[in-house]
Amino acid sequence: MTTTGRRALLTAGASAAAAALTGCASSGDPGPRKPDPATREAERVARAEAALRLRSVTASRTLLERYDAALAAHPALAPRLTPLRRSVAAHAAALGEGGTTVRPATAPPTPGTHASASASARPARPSAAAVAADPLAALKELAAAERTAADAHTAALVTAPPEYARLLASVAAAGAAHAYLLTEGARA
């Protein structure tokens, strides 16, 4: 065989192999497709709901940390605050169900323990605001935090899916009741 014949044979073989590979790739794998509008909308709704759940859980967790700080600063308030704190912990857990992963609720600090000891058992989080030295002022601050969380849950109702909106409404109502019990309810 001459050099020209070999080159022609190799060129023809390479061309045939390239054609076969191109045919396989285009017929078996259409490549990446853009999602249709319905799929894009479903993904947008899922992202929005996940963000809503995260904001709601964060508001409840922040409130829970305020209770922990108040209990650590004022152990004498434990009989009054512990039932409300348990309720807030249950709300935070319920708001996180079905799509949001959150850390488990921590137990309230026991009277006589140092706040940093209970904080070291939890993952690092932004520290809660300082608690007033006066117990009555601390209760008013906690009531304001309850109202803030309740307002956040109420504002989220507009964009929440129906079942989650019902839960948010219940948690917001409970927050308003807690705020009352922390301030006005004490006077009754």
Image (cartoon, rainbow, N blue to C red):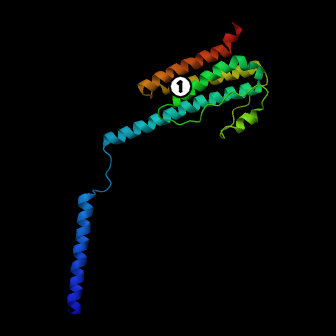
Q: Position of residue 158 (x, y in %)?
A: 45, 26
In the figure, residue 108 lies in which quadrant?
Answer: top right
Q: Quadrant of the N terminus?
A: bottom left
Residue in the picture at 21% in, 90% down? 4
Reply above or below: 161 against 188: below
Residue that appears at 23% across and 70% down? 19
Q: Quadrant of residue 132?
A: top right
**Kind of residue at disc 1:** His
- Residue 152 located left or right of residue 69: left
Q: Position of residue 60 (x, y in %)?
A: 59, 28
Residue 27: x and y in percent read: 23, 59
Give the x, y percent position of residue 21. 26, 68
Helix, strand or loop at label 1? It is helix
Count of numbered labels shown in the rendering: 1
Residue drawn at the location 57% of the way across and 28% of the way down: 92
Seen in the picture, residue 92 relative to 77 is either above or below; the reply is below
**Residue identified by numbered label 1:** 153
In this rendered view, identify the residue nearer to me: 140 or 89.
89
Label 1 crowd (10 A; few <14 / some 14-19 / many >=20): many
Residue under the image location 49 percent in, 33 percent down: 52
Placement of 37 over or under 138, stated as above or below: below
Q: Quadrant of residue 163?
A: top left
- Image quadrant containing the C terminus: top right
Q: Residue furthest top?
A: 188
Left/right placement of residue 52 relative to residue 70 reads left
